[in-house]
């Protein structure tokens, strides 16, 4: 497609240069710049793409999208000056891939916790209902059952549109995706047409990026502000920010709750360690999932399914088949009755929720041992809160490394330790080596005890000083149990609000 056709579909641009080259692709990485490639210069977290404009031109890029025209004479280059390069990248990606989100029923899920669970189970439910669907999530991206690895909760605009284009090629009707606060703020979802949006909850997270909780809230809210009037906005009334999210939306407003009067409400009939009996929309549902947060997740899932027009009775039948999401409360049991749970909980609220659930399951004499850390180069203020939540709900807590990244892991652990009161000091161990921390927890556990290993969940690496080393909490637990000749696997499904 010629540049002119792109320009005709863009707004708010100033054009410098009269070239009309054939456009073969788009990039925001100067190393991928070449003849026929539009280079979009964006301000990143650690670098500014405008600094690489000369390199992109030298590599042959005939068109440069930028917020500031560089000094110098570039006679063979066409510049498109825009207000926001990241936003323009989104529109360009939509044009390049022929607006794929307009051809799908796209549902975005945003919030602090619950995004992965709700998006993943909606995708699985769609397949169970006989639809073709795609998933864009923290764990992986899927197209009709085929897995594509991912490094981001929400990919950049080019990858997003490419994935959706592939979904259309594969005959997909639906796409379910997590919409992270970073992706919203960085305009990665610009230009996408959403059939609906879901808000789960809002708690302490990502303040290292957003600065304040108010900024974090406004970023999430902007997702709903930008929904079109034909879309639906489904929000959790049990979170005090639920109604705030839809104050200014043009979309059709719907609510869900397990406590308040709402459009979609679920009642817990019975809750036992093996699962729950629920009443949703006047119909009874048995689920192997447990915990109030999962009741909330399932209510949102049912609400979306009904709003998409799926057959109500079949929704209930197929929802009963939904089981746990990878790295969300995955359970491993030893032959001598030790239960180890690996969970992605990495916020104070998420940790509190999973601990409360496990304390509902265990009986009086069973102990709960928690292994938990906090990620480096991330929100520092939540570290003592994480430790405080852990120690409040357990018998022993082992503070350890998560992904220290470029920070000293001992410094992170000491910052967590500040959340421990004097009365609980005897319940706390500090073991920097995460592998040793997990092994210690397994050694301390006796028959009937529970071990919660929190923070990394599905991750199969540990990031230290820019290098990702192979590391899987589940493998370490399995290895310990195998060597103890006591291993047995459990398919018991518990999903954490993630």
Image (cartoon, helix red, strand yellow):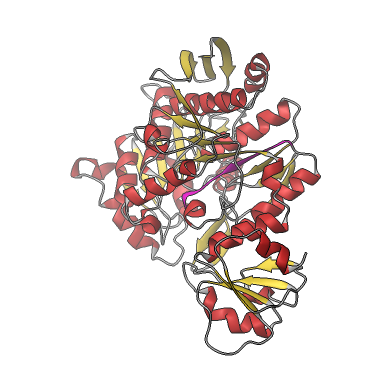
Picture coordinates of residue 152 (x, y %)? 57, 54
Picture coordinates of residue 133 (x, y %)? 71, 37
Residue nearest the observer in this picture, 271 or 438: 271
Residue nearest the observer in this picture, 342 or 384: 384
Picture coordinates of residue 266 (x, y %)? 48, 17
Please, is residue 69 above or below residue 389 in the view?
Answer: below
The quadrant the N terminus occupies is: bottom right
Residue most toward the bottom?
A: 73
Q: Is residue 309 visible?
A: yes
Verify whether residue 178 appears in magenta: yes
Q: Residue at x 49, y 66 (%)?
A: 83
> On the rendered structure, is 154 left or right of 363?
right
Picture coordinates of residue 297 (x, y %)? 51, 29
Tell me which corner region of the image, top left, top right, bottom left or bottom right, holds residue 14.
Answer: bottom right
> On the rendered structure, is 205 left or right of 107?
left
Q: Residue at x 29, y 43 (%)?
A: 388
Please, is residue 121 above or below residue 9 in the view?
Answer: above
Verify whether residue 467 appears in magenta: no
Q: Residue at x 24, y 45 (%)?
A: 425
Q: Residue at x 60, y 39 (%)?
A: 326
Magenta stretch? 173-181
Residue nearest the observer in this picture, 216 or 189: 189
């Amino acid at each position: 497609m010629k540049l002119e056709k792109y320009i005709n579909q863009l707004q708010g641009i100033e054009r410098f240069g009269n070239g009309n080259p054939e456009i073969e692709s788009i990039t925001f990485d100067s190393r991928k710049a070449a003849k026929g490639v539009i280079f979009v210069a964006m301000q990143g977290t650690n670098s500014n793409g405008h600094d690489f404009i000369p390199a992109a031109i030298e590599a042959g890029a005939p068109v440069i999208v930028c917020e500031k025209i560089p000094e110098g004479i570039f006679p063979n280059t066409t510049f498109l000056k825009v207000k926001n390069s990241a936003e323009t990248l989104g529109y360009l990606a939509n044009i390049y891939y022929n607006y794929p989100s307009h051809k799908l029923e796209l549902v975005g899920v945003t919030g602090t916790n619950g995004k992965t669970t709700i998006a993943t189970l909606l995708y699985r439910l769609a397949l169970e209902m006989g639809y073709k669907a795609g998933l864009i999530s923290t764990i992986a991206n899927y197209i009709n059952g085929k897995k594509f690895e991912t490094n981001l909760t929400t990919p950049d605009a080019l990858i997003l549109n490419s994935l959706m284009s592939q979904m259309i090629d594969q005959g997909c009707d639906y796409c379910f995706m997590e919409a992270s606060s970073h992706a919203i703020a960085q305009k990665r979802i610009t230009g996408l047409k959403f059939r609906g949006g879901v808000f789960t909850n809002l708690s302490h997270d990502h303040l290292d990026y957003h600065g304040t909780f108010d900024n974090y809230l406004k970023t999430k809210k902007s997702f709903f502000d930008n929904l079109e009037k034909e879309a639906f906005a489904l929000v959790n009334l049990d979170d005090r920010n639920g109604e705030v999210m839809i104050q200014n939306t043009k979309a059709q407003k719907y609510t869900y709750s397990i406590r308040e009067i709402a459009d979609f409400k679920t009642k817990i009939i019975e809750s036992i360690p093996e699962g729950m009996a629920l009443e949703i929309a006047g119909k009874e549902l048995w689920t192997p999932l447990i915990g109030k947060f999962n009741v909330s997740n399932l209510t949102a899932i049912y609400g979306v399914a009904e709003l998409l027009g799926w057959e109500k009775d079949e929704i209930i039948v197929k929802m009963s088949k939904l089981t746990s999401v990878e790295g969300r409360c995955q359970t491993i049991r030893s032959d001598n009755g030790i239960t180890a749970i690996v969970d992605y909980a990495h916020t104070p609220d998420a940790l509190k929720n999973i601990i409360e659930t496990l304390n509902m399951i265990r009986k009086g004499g069973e102990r709960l041992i928690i292994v938990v850390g906090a990620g480096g180069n991330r929100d520092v203020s939540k570290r003592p809160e994480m430790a405080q939540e852990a120690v409040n709900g357990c018998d022993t807590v082992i503070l350890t490394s998560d992904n220290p990244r470029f920070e000293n892991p001992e410094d992170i652990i000491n910052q967590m330790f500040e959340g421990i009161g004097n009365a609980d000091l005897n319940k706390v161990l500090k073991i920097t080596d995460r592998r040793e921390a997990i092994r210690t927890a397994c050694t301390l556990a006796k028959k009937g005890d529970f071990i919660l290993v929190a923070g990394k969940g599905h991750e199969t690496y540990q990031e230290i000083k820019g290098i990702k080393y192979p590391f899987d909490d589940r493998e370490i637990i399995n290895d310990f149990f195998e060597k103890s000749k006591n291993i047995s696997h459990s398919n018991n499904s518990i999903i954490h609000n993630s």
